[in-house]
Amino acid sequence: MNAKTVFALDIGSSSLKGVVASLHPKQASVNILAQARVKSSGIRRGIIFDVEDAARSLSELLNELEGTYKRDIAEAHILVGGPCLETRFAKGNILVSRPDEQIGQEDMARIYETIQTLPAPQNRTVLHVIPQNFVIDEVDRVKNPVDMQGSRLGLEATVIDIFNQAYISLQKALNIVGLKQAMVIAYPLASAKAVLPKRDREQGVCAIDFGAETTSLTVFEDDELRHIAVIPLGSQNITNDIANALRIHFDSAERIKIGFGSALASKVNKKDVIELSQFIEGEETVVGRKYIADIIDARLSEILDFVNAELKKLGKAGKLPAGAVLSGGGSDVPFMRDIVRRELKLSVRKADLSHYSRLFGDEVPTDMFGAYSVLVWLFDSAAGTQTTAYQKGIGGLFRRVLDTFLP
């Protein structure tokens, strides 16, 4: 297969990230042609609320990327996150079309279309249909029914959909900058699939992404997606707490959090202090580091309480053998792994893409994991190491592969 050049766009609350790359399946490599990040505007909790502001940020990102790439960018594969995403269970059935009752690719395409056309909650658009089990007549838990025989084919699936207005606002922003949408991808799904090795997904694992305004949770077991949840709290809430407590500007509070923060208050010496004059000209106040750590510890404990509540719904609280894998800018606070281990009673490690070093070579910046996760997905699909969508041709593959997320 010839090289395919793609643009991956990660729409975040604090920043927009983009990567232009050339995929080379035959050479098992990905060539990064350009990457950039700019501050977000007009976006809250992953949702565009001011189309014109968001378009200006997007235009700035495109200008930086095109300045390096030396070509115009016309099409994007887009990651979206936030509370606008929801998951639900769906089930559909069809009659097998061939007279000999052998199940073919056309039947697979029809069963997915059946799920996509089932009545959906009002004002929501389907992004992904994720199979849990196929059913052939009375035989359930079939993983790949192609070439098997039966008169009726069923599919039990998890559906991820998006609030219509969030989708419409995204389209408007793209239209303003003249960018065509290739596909829209749920951030928690693509990111978790990239940072979680297959063995972890088989044993049982959760990926926790600490974003600026949201924290997303994705749970896998038996290499199947079990649950996705988005909690409307993130690292920016910690910064707000510090700013309110010290009565200082948000930017100064962010610098204090980054420079002196600790996720575990118990790890900070009570005698350690912070001179605010380092951050605010003319300010003579001295603040104990323990006080700042108490603020961070309290807010993170609250966020992790919500995470644990989601795990309890699944009966998996403290019961995931591969533990928790942390990503997102908010996960860089010192002792973050320790507080997650304390609150969730799971083993904890930081996410990385080392198992994809064959593709990228150099270490991938943490804040670019989202955009790179799209490249991972597209490469695996093009190389044939993931099951592709049911449409012939490379154009169909790249437009629909994430509509049919197959393990």
Image (spheres, rainbow, N blue to C red):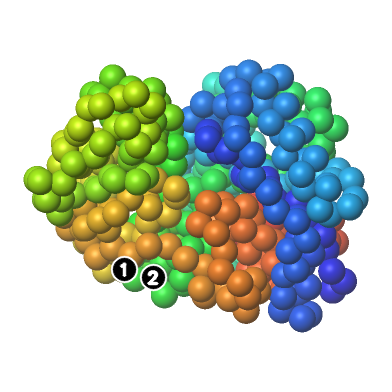
- Which residue is at 68% across, 49% downward? 36
Q: Which amino acid type is marked by label 1?
A: Ala
Q: Which amino acid type is marked by label 2?
A: Asp
Quarter that holds the N terminus: bottom right
Find numbered disc 2 in the image and state the secondary structure of the residue it sits on.
helix
What residue did someone put label 2 on?
A: 200
Q: Measured along the vertical axis of the image, is residue 263 above or below residue 288?
A: below
Counting other residues with Cα less than 10 Å from the Cα at mark 2, is it few (<14), some (14-19), or many (20 or more)?
A: many
Find numbered disc 1 in the image and state the secondary structure of the residue it sits on.
loop
Q: Measured along the vertical axis of the image, is residue 55 above or below residue 154?
A: above
| Residue 392 seen anywhere in this rendered image of the structure | no
Residue contact between numbered discs 1 and 2, judged by CB atoms under 8 Å: yes
Question: Could you say which is closer to the camera, residue 310 or residue 30?
Answer: 30
On screen, residue 352 versus residue 9, left or right, reads left
What number of labels is visible? 2
Question: Could you say which is closer to the camera, residue 341 or residue 247?
Answer: 247
On screen, residue 273 versus residue 230, left or right, reads left
Q: Earlier in the sequence, mark 1 or mark 2?
A: 2
Disc 1 and disc 2: Cα gap in Å? Answer: 5 Å
On screen, residue 307 versus residue 78, left or right, reads left
The x and y percentages for residue 392 are 83, 61
Label disc, if present, on residue 107 of the rendered structure:
none
What residue did someone put label 1 on?
A: 322
* Quarter of the rendering containing residue 238: top left
Q: Measured along the vertical axis of the image, is residue 232 above or below residue 193?
A: above
Q: Measured along the vertical axis of the image, is residue 126 above or below residue 358?
A: above
- Which residue is at 28% across, 19% downward? 247
